[in-house]
C-alpha cells in the first residue's frame, strides 16, 4: 500500500504520523465496540470467528493486487506455520483478551495491549534472542521503561483513589451495563496478562513464518481465515445454541465489520506502509495514544469513572513505553 507523494511532497511530513494516529483510533474504537457487544450478550467466540472472516475478506484485495499469484507458493511447511501462527497469534490471545475485557473495562484492558512490547523484550532476553549492555545508557533506559510501565499497570490495578467526575456519560445505559459485566477484575487481569504474554510469544515466531512464506498480505489473509475456523470450532464445542451465532442488523454487526475492515485490514495496511517509509520501530511509538484515546472515550461515552490512580498509572505506562521504545540497546 502506498500513499501518493509520500517522501517527496511537502505533505510527506505529516502523512506518516497522521496514519499512525488513525491506527490508534481504529484500535480504541474496536475495544469500545467489542466491550459494548460483549456486555450486551454477544458470544465471544462468535465475535472472534466473524471478525476474522471479515478481516480476511478485507485483506484479500490487497493480496490480489500487491502479491498477485503468490498464493501458489503456500506449501505444507508454510501451511503448518500459518496454522500455528493463527493459533498463537489470534485464537488464544484474542480469546483471552475478550474474556478479560468482559470482566474489566476498556480503559483498563487497553493498558495490557500496550505492554506487549515489554513482555516481548523480557522473553527475548530469556530465550537469548536479544542482548543489551546493562551498564549502557540505552540498556538502563530500557530497564527503567519496563519498571515504570509495570509499576503503572500495578497502580491502575491496585489503587483507585479519588474519582474525578468531569462529565456525564453520553450512553448512560452502557455505563449500567458495563458496571454489571465488569464483575471480576482479578480474573480479568489474569486473562489480559495471559493475552499479552501469548502475543509476545507470537511476535517471536513471526521471523520464522516470514522466512517460510515471505508474503505478508497472503499470510495475514490466510491467518485470519484459519483463526476464524479455529475459534468457530472451539465456540461450537462450548455453545451449540444457534441464537448465540446469529448476526442481525444491529451493533454486533457494526462491531464485526468495523473490526474486520478498520481494526484488521486498515490497521495492517497503514502499519505496513509506515514500516516501509519510517522503519519497524516507528508504529510502536504511537501505541500509547490508544491508551489516551480509550480512557477518554470510555469515560465520555460509557461513563467509566476517571480516578487519580488510573490517571497516574496510565501516565506511568505511557512514559515507560516511550522510554523503552525510544532507545536502541
Image: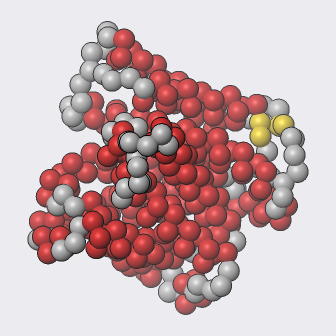
Q: Is residue 192 left or right of residue 1?
A: right
Q: What residue occupies the far front of the structure in this picture?
A: 9
Q: Is residue 175 above or below residue 74?
A: above
Taking the image as drawn, is residue 227 in sight?
A: no
Q: Residue at x 41, y 54 (%)?
A: 4
Tell me where residue 232 appears, x and y as whole percent: 42, 78
Tell me where residue 178 appears, x and y as whole percent: 74, 60
Q: Is residue 104 above or below residue 34?
A: above
Determine which quarter of the picture holds residue 236. Answer: bottom left
Tell me where residue 133 appears, x and y as whole percent: 27, 15
Q: Is residue 138 left or right of residue 212?
A: right
Q: Which quadrant does the N terminus fall into? A: bottom left
Residue toward you, 247 or 197: 247
Q: Residue at x 50, y 49 (%)?
A: 19
User: How is this picture coloured?
Assistant: secondary structure
Q: Residue at x 60, y 78 (%)?
A: 253
Residue toward you, 56 or 124: 56
Q: What residue occupies the far top of the structure in this picture?
A: 135
Tell me where residue 29 appears, x and y as whole percent: 62, 58
Q: Which quadrant does the C terminus fall into? A: top left
Q: Residue at x 70, y 35 (%)?
A: 310
Taking the image as drawn, is residue 257 in sight?
A: yes
Residue toward you, 246 or 281: 281
Q: Is residue 279 above or below residue 219?
A: above
Amino acid at each position: 500500500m502506498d500513499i501518493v507523494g509520500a517522501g517527496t511532497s511537502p505533505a510527506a511530513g505529516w502523512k506518516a504520523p497522521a496514519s499512525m494516529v488513525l491506527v490508534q483510533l481504529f484500535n480504541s474504537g474496536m475495544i469500545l465496540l467489542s466491550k459494548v457487544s460483549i456486555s450486551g450478550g454477544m458470544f465471544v467466540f462468535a465475535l472472534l470467528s466473524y471478525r476474522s472472516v471479515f478481516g480476511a475478506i478485507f485483506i484479500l484485495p490487497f493480496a490480489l493486487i500487491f502479491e498477485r499469484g503468490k498464493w501458489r507458493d503456500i506449501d505444507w511447511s508454510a501451511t503448518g506455520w500459518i496454522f500455528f501462527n493463527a493459533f498463537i497469534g489470534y485464537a488464544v490471545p484474542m480469546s483471552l483478551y475478550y474474556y478479560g475485557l468482559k470482566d474489566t473495562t476498556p480503559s483498563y484492558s487497553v493498558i495490557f495491549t500496550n505492554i506487549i512490547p515489554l513482555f516481548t523484550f523480557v522473553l527475548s532476553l530469556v530465550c537469548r534472542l536479544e542482548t543489551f549492555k546493562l551498564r549502557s545508557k540505552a540498556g538502563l533506559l530500557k530497564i527503567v521503561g519496563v519498571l515504570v510501565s509495570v509499576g503503572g499497570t500495578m497502580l491502575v490495578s491496585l489503587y483507585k483513589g479519588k474519582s474525578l467526575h468531569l462529565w456525564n456519560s453520553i450512553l448512560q445505559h452502557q455505563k449500567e451495563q458495563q458496571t454489571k459485566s465488569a464483575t471480576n477484575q482479578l480474573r480479568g487481569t489474569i486473562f489480559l496478562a495471559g493475552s499479552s504474554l501469548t502475543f509476545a510469544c507470537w511476535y517471536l515466531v513471526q521471523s520464522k513464518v516470514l522466512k517460510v512464506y515471505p508474503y505478508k498480505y497472503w499470510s495475514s489473509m490466510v491467518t485470519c481465515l484459519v483463526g476464524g475456523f479455529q475459534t468457530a470450532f472451539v465456540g461450537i464445542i462450548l455453545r451449540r445454541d444457534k441464537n448465540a451465532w446469529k448476526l442481525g442488523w444491529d451493533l454486533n454487526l457494526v462491531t464485526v465489520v468495523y473490526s474486520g475492515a478498520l481494526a484488521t485490514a486498515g490497521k495492517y495496511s497503514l502499519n505496513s506502509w509506515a514500516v516501509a517509509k519510517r522503519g519497524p520501530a516507528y508504529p510502536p511509538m504511537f501505541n500509547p495514544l490508544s491508551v489516551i484515546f480509550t480512557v477518554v472515550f470510555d469515560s465520555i461515552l460509557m461513563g467509566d469513572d476517571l480516578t487519580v490512580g488510573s490517571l497516574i498509572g496510565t501516565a506511568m505506562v505511557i512514559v515507560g513505553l516511550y522510554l523503552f521504545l525510544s532507545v536502541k540497546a
